Image (cartoon, rainbow, N blue to C red):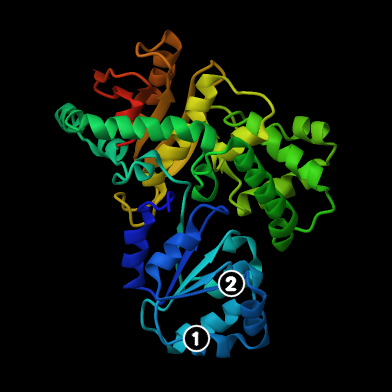
Amino acid sequence: MPHLRVRHLFPIIKRALSYSPLVGMLGHRQVGKTTLLEELCKTYKTLDQKEVLNQVSLDPARFLRKFNSFPVALDECQFAPELFPALKDHVRTEKRPGQFVLSGSVRFTSRKAIRESLTGRILMFELFPMTAAENADLPLGTALIDILASKSSRDLHKVLHKLSDKPRSSRDAVRKSFWLSTENGGLPGVCFIRDVKMRRLKWESQLETILERDLELISETTLSYGVKRFVLSELARQQGHPLDYRDLSRKARVSVPALRKLLLAFEGLFLIRFIPCEGGEKRPTCFLEDQGEAQHLTDFRLDERAVFSHCLYMHLRVPFQTPLGKLESPARVAQYRTRGGAYVPFAFFSGASGLGIIPSLEENPSRGVLGSSKSFLDKFPHSKIVIVHPGERFEVLSEKTILLPETLALL
């Protein structure tokens, strides 16, 4: 099949199964969870099937006892909240690791009964949309983590020297995958459909399923599908900008409390991701989880700089936010804005260290970009700035400011 790729989460979940009886894998619809489950597990069951759902509903404890070939994949678990108390009791007596991998398209913490049953009993992971490195059949890129971890100018130059030795074929493959993702996104169930009309039909069908069926699982609302889709479209247009709830409320003709509730549900469905702002701006911003979906939702083309920035966020966050990855714990992500106009679209913080990312379409950084870099470094003195551009030039501009092509940033 054309969409089969080695996903970065495969070895991580495999490792987690050797420690925990329960492992969770969540993510956006069509992100590739089912394919990964079928590769990892000896037995696969989905609660999306009526027969399986009925078995769970009638006697969840008996359903769990019938398996003898582990690990067992239980897909779309959000449809059976009664399964989770039974799982809690099951692993209390059956403690051996590697029994069940639970998967869903709804964040489990969005449902109280599920959250309370799983607390302290499961290792949880999120499968992000496919990165450019994954799509090119390359290992998950860690270049930026290596830059973040460098302690001196000498360490930094070693990292860049190592990056410069990356084969041209790898860089070309990553560049091609990255720019394709600005249109097609990174959901394997959609992005590999070559026919544009068919891909659009797939987007619409998926959005209807999420906004009409999945949303009901975590939030009661009387809002119409049209209103919910309109709000999501506005968020796609305004990615990276501080959220103005009053303005969005006026445009959608929805009260601010109802709007806040809806956006929390969107995050629980892996449609959007809230990012806090620092540097003077108090309102959060948000990005859509998949930029192919974002492009589909907007009825006009965003400018190239915005698209470049949004897609860099989608790809670059993955190594920073994957548990059991190269960092000891997932990095905190934030945006930096000041009243004076300094702007760093996203930054990752690990302990006392941080790494700000500034996308630039030019190889020679503008005065505004350099000013934003200085402001960020003044605010976070134990941090670095990487200016990412689509050209070829890479250079250490100062001890804490690096100019890097997107091909190297993604490797």
In the rendered image, the quadrant that contains the N terminus is bottom left
Report x, y in % for residue 208.
72, 50
Instruction: List the single residue furthest toward the top.
Output: 367
In this picture, residue 160 sits left or right of residue 93: left
Q: Is residue 353 above or below residue 91?
A: above
- Give coordinates of residue 397: x percent, y percent: 27, 17
Residue at 74% across / 42% down in the picture? Answer: 229
Q: Nearer the viewer, mark 1 or mark 2?
A: 1
Picture residue at 15% right of the left edge, 31% below the top: 158
Does 282 appear above or below 322?
above
Q: Which mark is residue 116?
A: 2
At horizontal 64% and vertical 29% (from top left) the residue drawn is 238
Q: Position of residue 307 (x, y in %)?
A: 52, 26
User: What residue would you read off at disc 1?
Assistant: 90
Quadrant in which residue 71 is drawn: bottom left
Query: Are dots 1 and 2 in contact, CB under 8 Å?
Result: no
Task: Please tell me which residue is depicted at 85% across the width and 37% down the height of the picture.
Answer: 253
- Considering only order in the chain, which callout, 2 or 1, is on the residue closer to the N terminus? 1
For label 1, count other residues whose C-alpha is less than 10 Å away and answer few (under 14), some (14-19) or many (20+).
some
Q: Is residue 168 left or right of residue 204?
A: left
Q: Amino acid at mark 1?
A: His
Where disc 1 sits, the SS reads helix
Side (left or right) of 25 relative to 13: right
Residue 121 lies, with reference to residue 158, above or below; the image says below
- Amino acid on which the number 2 mark rests in the picture: Glu
